[in-house]
Image (cartoon, rainbow, N blue to C red):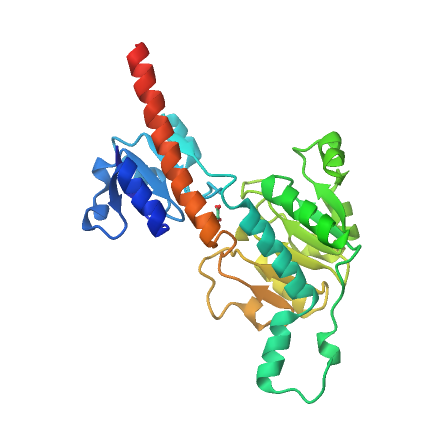
């Protein structure tokens, strides 16, 4: 199957792809002409209607990772093109980054480093006073695989109370995890010391957190987003951080990526930014890359089996 890989993937996953499929990789000059593609593997490459229309033989779009917001799903469906992703491949990596960001923000580690680099005159400066996570409350916006792992890891490590806002999860599901379901976003925002977002970007989640929601959070709370940038209104977040509406925020994702070095959020001492790095571990990269290839191989086998029956 002629498979175009538009974004760089892990070298061992590329090798694996070449063993199983007929690959045109991002470094090949043939990548410019999509017309022969029967399958594609994408990370951030945008599979718009226009791009799909340039691939008359396309049968499957395999997403390297989880979020499929760079793919026109409705159009792919209309054209009968299968869309797959690798939902388990990066869940631990992203969940671990959430915890890293929570600790970094609550203990002002980045700011500490900056102060040390500038030279400090005394230990334990008052500006670097943070807070403990122990027995605090985490509010999970979204209880998919990543949210669930974040909840379990924080509960196990710091005995945190775990609250969940997720209209698609039942009270029973939450209590089976040892978490508490909240029906109302406002209430979870009011009660959490850390709010972590792990939902896909959809029409319903775009701008989910704007000025009003930020104003409901505790003054000493932290907001973390490792999902998709457009879920948070960045201008409102900037004002909230500048005016001490919340303690701090850590974003791995931005409305426009990569984030510009002139982005106003970067002027806030209580802000931490990472460049869409949640899945960027050796472990997850191999799993996402080989997982995307496996989805195409599985699709091929299904097609072969159904043509034999017919
Ligand atoms: O790095 C990747 O390819 C995955 C990125 C991540 O946002 C995802 O959608 O799973």
Q: Position of residue 99 (x, y in %)?
A: 64, 56
- Residue 212 vertical placement versus 298 (above, below): below
Q: Using the rendered view, name the quadrant where residue 104 is placed.
A: bottom right
- Residue 232 in sight here: no
Q: Considering the image in quadrants, where does the N terminus appear?
A: top left
Count of numbered badges drawn on the protein: 0
Please name whichever residue, 113 or 206, is drawn nearer the observer in this view of the structure: 113
The vertical placement of 234 against 270, above or below, is above
- What percent of the width, then of the height, locates residue 204? 59, 40
Q: Is residue 32 above or below residue 111?
A: above
Q: Residue at x 70, y 41 (%)?
A: 165
Is 95 positioned to the left or the right of 172 in the image?
left
On the image, the x and y values in percent for residue 141 come to 66, 45
At x 72% / y 42%, what residue is drawn? 164
Q: Is 252 on the left-hand or right-hand side of 102?
A: left
Most extreme residue toward the top is 310
Residue shown at 74% from the left, 69% from the top: 130
Question: Taking 290 as reference, is 132 left or right?
Answer: right
Q: Is residue 83 in view from this perspective? A: yes
Would you identify the image quadrant in which residue 128 lies? bottom right
Most foreground residue, 153 or 232: 153
Image quarter hosting the C terminus: top left
Measured from the top left, where is residue 46 in percent x and y? 37, 45
Tell whether 142 sits left or right of 16: right
Asked if residue 90 is positioned above or below residue 234 in the image, the reply reads above
């Amino acid at each position: 199957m002629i498979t175009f890989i538009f974004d760089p993937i892990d070298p061992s996953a590329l090798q694996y792809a070449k063993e199983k499929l007929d690959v045109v990789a991002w470094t090949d000059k043939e990548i410019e002409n999509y017309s022969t593609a029967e399958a594609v593997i994408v990370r951030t490459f945008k599979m718009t209607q226009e791009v799909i229309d340039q691939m008359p033989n396309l049968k499957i779009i395999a997403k390297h990772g989880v979020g499929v917001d760079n793919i026109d799903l409705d159009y792919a469906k209309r054209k009968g093109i299968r869309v797959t992703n690798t939902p388990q491949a990066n869940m631990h990596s992203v969940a671990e980054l959430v915890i890293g960001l929570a600790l970094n923000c609550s203990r002002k580690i980045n700011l500490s480093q900056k102060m040390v680099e500038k030279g400090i005159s005394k230990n334990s400066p008052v500006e670097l006073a943070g807070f403990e996570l122990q027995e605090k409350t985490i509010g999970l916006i979204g209880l998919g695989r990543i949210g669930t792992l974040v909840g379990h890891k924080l509960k196990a490590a710091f005995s945190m109370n775990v609250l969940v806002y997720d209209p698609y999860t039942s009270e029973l599901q939450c209590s089976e995890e040892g978490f508490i379901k909240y029906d109302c976003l406002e209430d979870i925002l009011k009660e959490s010391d850390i709010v972590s977002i792990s939902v896909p970007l959809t029409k319903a989640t775009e701008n989910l957190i704007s000025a009003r929601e930020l104003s409901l959070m505790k003054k000493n709370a932290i907001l973390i987003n490792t999902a998709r940038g457009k879920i948070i209104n960045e201008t409102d977040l900037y004002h909230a951080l500048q005016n001490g509406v919340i303690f701090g925020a850590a974003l791995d994702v931005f409305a426009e990526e990569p984030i510009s070095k002139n982005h106003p959020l970067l002027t806030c001492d209580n802000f931490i930014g990472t460049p869409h790095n949640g899945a960027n571990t050796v472990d997850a990269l191999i799993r996402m890359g080989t997982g995307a290839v496996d989805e195409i191989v599985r699709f091929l086998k299904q097609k072969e089996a159904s043509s034999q029956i017919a």
